[in-house]
Image: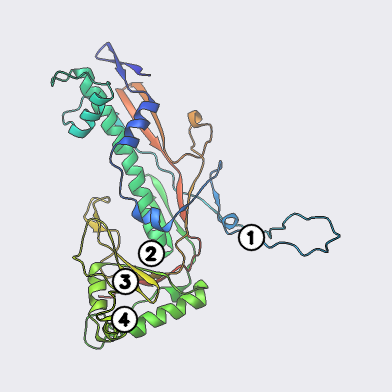
Amino acid sequence: MSQTFTFQNAPVELLDIPQLVLITDKMKKVDTWIIDRFYPQRVAYNKTVVPVGELNTATPLAPFVTPSTGARPIDVAETAQVDFVKPAYLKPMMTVTPATIQDSALVGQLRQYGIIATGSNRLSDADLLLIDQAQKAIYLRQSIENRKLLIARDVLLYGKTTFASADFPKYEVDYRRNPACNFSPLIKWGQVGAKVMDDMQAMIDISIEHGGSSPHMIVTSSKVFNAMRQDPEFKEKFIAPFAGISVPLTPSFDHKDKPQFRGTVDNIEIWTYDVQHNMDGAAGRFIPEDFFGMINDANGWIAHCAIQNLEAFGQALEFFLTQDQKKNPSSIELLAESSPLAVPNNKNGLVGGRGFV
């Protein structure tokens, strides 16, 4: 059902919120591999903080009883101290104006849905306003997904993240990863004297000691992976014994637009991720070129807290969109809100760092 606004003293029918949400769902999404792969668990809280301690539930054990005793409920131990962490609060806004540049794929979708008339390539002022409305809604949703992605990346790689902007008080969410888990080699891999095998064994030992288990996955860049793969000791242990039998590391070109599974050594999956972004106004990478991390826990949480908007009634939603017409200055505004937080299932779930090449 459309929503009517006044534009240039005339009523104009634009998309309502459910239609805008549907449009954003149908369009191409942000690549969220990091969130999907390392934060598979989701939780929502109708409050403004995340009780992180509640996420680490005790392993349930059936109680001991005699056969003649009645059944008992499972007693789940409660943590003595619960940390309440304030999540980020995201509230981007954009003004709707007649679109001077149109996304052809989006216009095609709007024609397919019957929102914009087919049979003529000419777009009216009302059509241009509606197209801009849809484009801005998609842009707002992508901006929130991108910010969540960077928060999740920081928590994964460094065990902490910082929330800050020009009109937002800076604060840091630090999950207190053990300093021993921040590992860098004494000699960069690929250089004379590098000890790739010794460095990896040291990281495995740290993972067991502070993370509670051996790593089952490696995430790094293609540059670090290629240096590791060419190391003589690494090839002697993991490549040479399988010559003519199997290929533990699959030969492939480096792809900078998607995650790459490179193979398995000692039951440890190796993934490279060279995707770049331009989210902070300058070109950057999700995984730094010199980063190498061994992961023992990839079961993190993405939490969403209450939307602090009266129309949302305090619901914990991943994405909340509203629109309103202002009289002074005269404008139609689209506003998106979200309150996300990335939480590691094991704060010492990654051992590694930068400086490997």
Mark sitting earlier along the chain (1/4)? 1
**Label 2 neighbour load within 10 Å: few <14, some 14-19, many 20+:** many
Mark sitting earlier along the chain (2/3)? 2
Give the residue displayed 32% in from the left and 43% down from the top.
143
Task: Name the element at disc 3.
Answer: loop
Mark sitting earlier along the chain (1/2)? 1
Work out how far the residue at label 2 is from the one at label 3, CA to CA, in angstroms: 10 Å
The label shown at residue 238 is: 4
x%, y% of residue 24?
A: 33, 35
Q: Give the residue at the far front of this rendering.
A: 245
The label shown at residue 157 is: 2
x%, y% of residue 207?
A: 46, 75
**Circles 2 and 3: CB atoms closer than 8 Å:** no
Vertically, is 69 above or below 333?
below
What residue is disc 1 on?
A: 81
Q: Quadrant of residue 118?
A: top left
Give the residue displayed 46% in from the left and 65% down from the top.
297
Mark sitting earlier along the chain (4/2)? 2
